[in-house]
Amino acid sequence: MDTRAETARILVEFLEVAITSIVFHKRVYPAGAFERRRYMNAVVHRAKQPELRDYIHSSVNALFPFIQKGLVERVLVIFFNKDDNVVNERFVFKLGMNQSSSSGSKIEEADLEFSLRSFLIKLPTSENLTKPLPPGKIALKSPHLRTIDSQKFADCRWEVTAYFRGLPEVGTSKEADVWIPTDTKQWQHLPEVTPIKSMSSQPLSLQLFVEHPSPSEPKTCHV
């Protein structure tokens, strides 16, 4: 496996774990919907419900060929109000595959995983940098996901969204067909950005930050 493919593989695995951690720490579902695991020698959480686990897994793994080609610019976890579809918060993974990486060079997997591990350690301590989601007793993530129980947790819906540097051609592959254009509108004003963690290495650069709507953003604006 060449350098780009190996880097993309490691990144996709990391994103699946990181997105699950974000959903866990945002309390979209009760804690009992997750189980503790170890990944990259860090304590993380894995979704126990098949629909939730499969949604995250399939969404992120469908990005593999596009990450390998350097086509993916950002991967977002977006939290919406349940009733009015207004975006409350966006976790943004901004990534870049080093163009100088070649099939003849070899990455040090342990070094890359050590750098990515620092993101997983940082996520649980970043809750004070984010805003609480609307409280409620019903969790909605996607139409097919059922409520797990009646405990109090965030009353919202959420999704994984990817921004591409170049649009993949639909119909050319199964991976391309998974991703459909979004009708999500942009905020009218620049968002408030809170950095969480960043890294830069030979095969990969990665930034994680949180975006919130500007205080001047119209309350009725759907994004």
Image: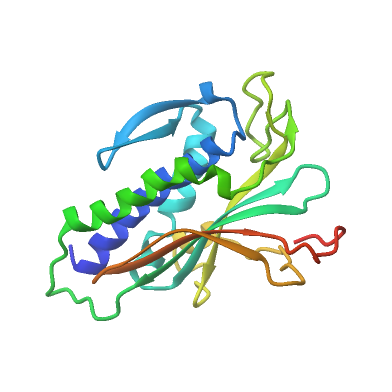
Query: The N terminus is located in which quarter?
Result: bottom left
Residue 40 in percent (x, y) is at 26, 43
- Residue 99 vs residue 117, the one in the foreground: 117
Query: The C terminus is located in which quarter?
Result: bottom right
- Residue 128 vs residue 178, the one in the foreground: 128
Left or right of 217 in this view: 54 = left
Residue 18 in percent (x, y) is at 43, 46
Left or right of 131 in this view: 18 = left
What scheme was used to colour the molecule? rainbow
Q: Residue at x 30, y 33 (%)?
A: 38
Q: Which residue is drawn at 77% across and 53% down?
A: 86
Query: Farthest residue toward the front?
Result: 128
Q: Which residue is drawn at 66% across and 20% down?
A: 151
Residue 122 in percent (x, y) is at 41, 47
Left or right of 146 in this view: 123 = left
Left or right of 105 in this view: 53 = right
Query: Farthest residue toward the top?
Result: 150
For residue 105, above or below residue 126: below
Query: Farthest residue toward the bottom?
Result: 100
- Displayed quadrant of residue 214: bottom right
Q: Residue at x 73, y 35 (%)?
A: 155
- Residue 103 vs residue 15, the one in the foreground: 15
How many numbered marks appear? 0
- Displayed quadrant of residue 115: bottom left
For residue 28, above or below residue 62: above
For residue 45, above or below residue 97: above
Residue 87 in percent (x, y) is at 72, 54
- Displayed quadrant of residue 148: top right
